[in-house]
Image: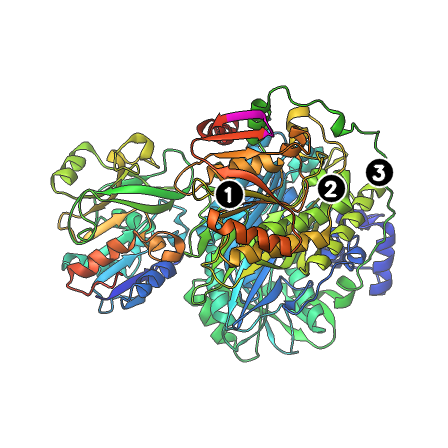
Amino acid sequence: MSAEPWREVGLTASEYARLLELLGRDPTSLELGMFGLMWSEHCSYKTSRLHLKQLPTSGPRVLQGPGENAGIVDIGDGQAIAFKIESHNHPSAIEPYQGAATGVGGILRDIFTMGARPIAILDSLRFGDPSEPRVRHLFDGVVSGIAGYGNCVGVPTVGGEVVFDRCYQGNPLVNVMCVGLITGGRVVRGLAAGPGNPVLLVGARTGRDGIHGASLLASQELDASAQERRPAVQVGDPFLEKLLLEACLELAGSDEVVGIQDLGAAGLTSAAAEAASRAGTGVELDVALVPRREGGMVPYEVMLSESQERMLVVAKAGSEDKVKAVFRRWGLDATVIGRVTGDGRFKVRDGEELVADIPVEALTQRAPAYDRPRRRPERAAAVDPLLLPEPANYAAAFLRVVGSPNCGTREWVYRQYDHMVQTNTVALPGGDAAVLRLKGTAKAIALSTDGNGRYCYLDPRRGAALAVAEAARNVSCVGAEPIAVTNCLNFGNPEKPEIMWQFTEAVSGMAEACTALGTPVTGGNVSFYNDTEGRSIYPTPVVGMLGLLTDVNRICGTGFRRTGDCLFLLGETRAELGGGEYLHVVHGLVAGDPPDLDLAREAALQAAVREAIAQGLLASAHDLSDGGLAVALAESCLAAAGGARGARVDLGTGLRPDWALFSESATRVLVSAGPAEARTLTALLQARGVPCTALGAVGDGSLTVAAGSRLLFSLPISEVEAAWKGASPCMFL
Amino acid sequence: MRFGVVVFPGSNCDTDCYHALRGLGYPVEYVWHEAASLPEVDCVVLPGGFSYGDYLRAGAIARFARIMPAVAAHAEAGGAVIGICNGFQILLEAGLLPGAMRRNASLQFRCHDVHVRVEAGGMFTSLAGRGRVLRLPIAHAEGNYYCGAEVLTELEANGQIAFRYCDADGKISAAANPNGAVGNIAGITNRRGNVLGLMPHPERCCDPVLGNTDGRLIFASIAASRGGLCHVG
């Protein structure tokens, strides 16, 4: 063993001292490797654990909060939803297709391991400047990888986001959310309970791939040597995953199973340790029994392999053959590789030889935890966005924002995803939130992912709260009640005090918003070390929101429906350009403060929108976010039923027109309503104290925007459409 | 009218077909790929998905599944067979339909609604009628149908071209062709007219909550051809 053995496995000298204390002796090389993985940032959450306690995690619907493979919420009628979001950033930076594909595979397993059938995937993606060839390679590879895996497994990819910003140039973000439905059956947990029960390894054979892959790759910065780590990226097999999915769900309904745990980062080591830790038991495995892809693998490789599409199943003693028969029917290997013990130790044998013997708790609950130093970053005095001049040509500024990489159509992306398989997708991609009906009931769920790195860079606390508010607003705009959150917290190197400050601020902001909006966080993922060559990404907390609809026939879309319908802007518009898309696209600036957020007003606005939809008062509803009213108007025109429609809009004279048009003030929704419903609608909003401004009416062929008597622009809707759609062909094809 | 939906490892539209047919009121059951014979069914459905992962050519392994000789015998005896998407690919590989499938001209998976024009009468389209334009979803990476000039002439002469991609008004154009298929072909039948393969997914548009029920016409036509009750409202 070398003089500083901890270095090879990514630990520090003080962590090694802790290891020695917990173990009471020098570790074997396998034991050291196991500690290295389990105490990595990725597996142990050693930097974030302390701070995540701020998040609200309980509520009347929460059946399973953080700590399991996925969170679970009750949606009534004996049904529950399991959902979670996870990052696969570094593998995707190195090998975009397989990195993204195995990201999908990993999160799918987290869901079906709990006995839930995966019914939807969403992807929250961030890339650098799309005009750079390397970025296009990453973008194309990630989208193809998601499509290649999700389409084959037969789970629809129904939504998500794609955002471009230079800060993600070398370090794209690939956050994948999966949602599963538990019907009638019981919830299966990742428990190695009941000493004497057999532990089976099922699915793929174990190879040498991905050793130190997800776990260590995700626990350090990306540097010049990162490309050399390509062999550490796993390769996915979606067909095998599909078989594993069907077999596990078949098994979940039976009484033979005690627990199922998927093998993800840190492979067999983590799966067995976690399952034993949750059950308060021990586990004894024999690596000689593990089916392998190749000969000559040593115990270290078997225990640390991150080969994909594998599951650990803890069965009731005596039911091994029944369990094996289920897997055999699906053409899968299932092999007993050990058993649950009562001594709280993780023992690994290689045949007769004992090669590791560690207290389970030492690997899991007694992993180090840090309260790392934090410091507010200093930034040069920024430009005041309100001192910038008015655009000389409003039509040109409008078209530039609408056709920008961040606001243009995402059709190029989502048409590569099968978003309809399983025949539940009621609201297709492109709207505020995806809507999935739940067969056999009148209910539906709504899903959205949101996050704004620029806002969080300027003010992480408010930016994170704004992400929660927007995700909830998106879900409310289709008529669903936001009920729970999963989060993916993407940050730079937390050993830098400025990054740590961003992290704790963001978590606080998220906690405040989730508490105020009544949406507990049921799980998620932290991704640190998103740095390339010393430069960190913007802090990018991503929120995955789950909403519930009681009547699938009472949903609302973003597109206008009828010429002559009245247009209203709900909420209050202030001169808030800070961190906005207009500032970024037209002035090349990331400056100012993100929009203000009053959570009580946000909750009231969302409740009013839901009520209006439930009463059938709205023809359309669209959340205002990036690009403000300008982009919302364009999108509602272009998503109109039966083809694009125009509108006539008067912004009034209260604010300078560019502020009114491009402000990203939070807590706003653009709605249209028939003249007959308009009066009832305004009365409802007034009664609830929600500001409502009449903007104009839905028109036919052109979009005309004025400020009082001053005409700002009038554009044929075909020209708006060309700009909006133009974003993709010229960029990506 | 009884339907049997074959389940291959990797099928993923099997449950969608089952659900759509049940929703229309037809008796339907799953048929496991390892079965040696078919149960008593009138129409066999080969559903969409990625049978055996489709790591080779799509459908190239499924054609060797244990159930396939029984499917061929069912077709030979005049029974109805409908292959949707991956099912169409399997029918081509099995030689139950002529031609072959190539990767989409775009080289990308494509998922969106398309319009198809009904080109031929017969048991799969009798209720729709020739010339009718249907809106159906597609979701495939290998839907670029190919056959040589001779076979194409034959297909046309025999009225074997069931559907062609078209625009919303029924005009056949290159712009309306989502994958580069020869002659804008979206679906063909065998010469006898009892085996249909098509790339679009009729099972995805049978339920009003999904905003489109054009797919019902195809399943209802099959049922009507057997004198079965038409359950379509």
Badge 3, how many Cα within 10 Å: few under 14, some, many 20+?
few
Tell me, yes or no, whether the highlighted magenta stretch contains residue B88.
no
Disc 1 is attached to a residue of which chain? A
- Please tell me which residue lies in front, B151 or A637: A637
Lower sequence index among marks 2 and 3:
3
SS of the residue at dot 1? strand
Disc 3 is attached to a residue of which chain? A
Give the residue type at disc 2: Cys
Residue visible at 52% across and 67% down? A182
Label 2: which residue?
Answer: A456
Residue visible at 60% across and 30% down? A708
Q: Is residue A446 left or right of residue A221?
A: left
Give the residue type at disc 1: Cys
SS of the residue at dot 2? helix
Residue visible at 24% across and 53% down? B218
- Please tell me which residue lies in front, A239 or B224: B224
Q: Which mark is residue A377?
A: 3
Quadrant showing the N terminus of chain B: bottom left
Compared with residue B31, is residue A177 higher up or lower down, i.e. above or below? above
Residue A305 in view, yes or no: no
- Please tell me which residue lies in front, A321 or B131: B131
Nearer the observer, disc 1 or disc 3?
1
Lower sequence index among marks 1 and 2:
2
- Please tell me which residue lies in front, A365 or A140: A140
Question: Disc 1 and disc 3: Cα gap in Å?
Answer: 46 Å
Compared with residue B103, is residue A505 higher up or lower down, i.e. above or below? below
Label 1: which residue?
Answer: A566
Numbered range of the magenta stretch = A707-714
SS of the residue at dot 3? loop
Q: How many marks?
A: 3
Which quadrant of the structure image shows residue B107?
A: top left
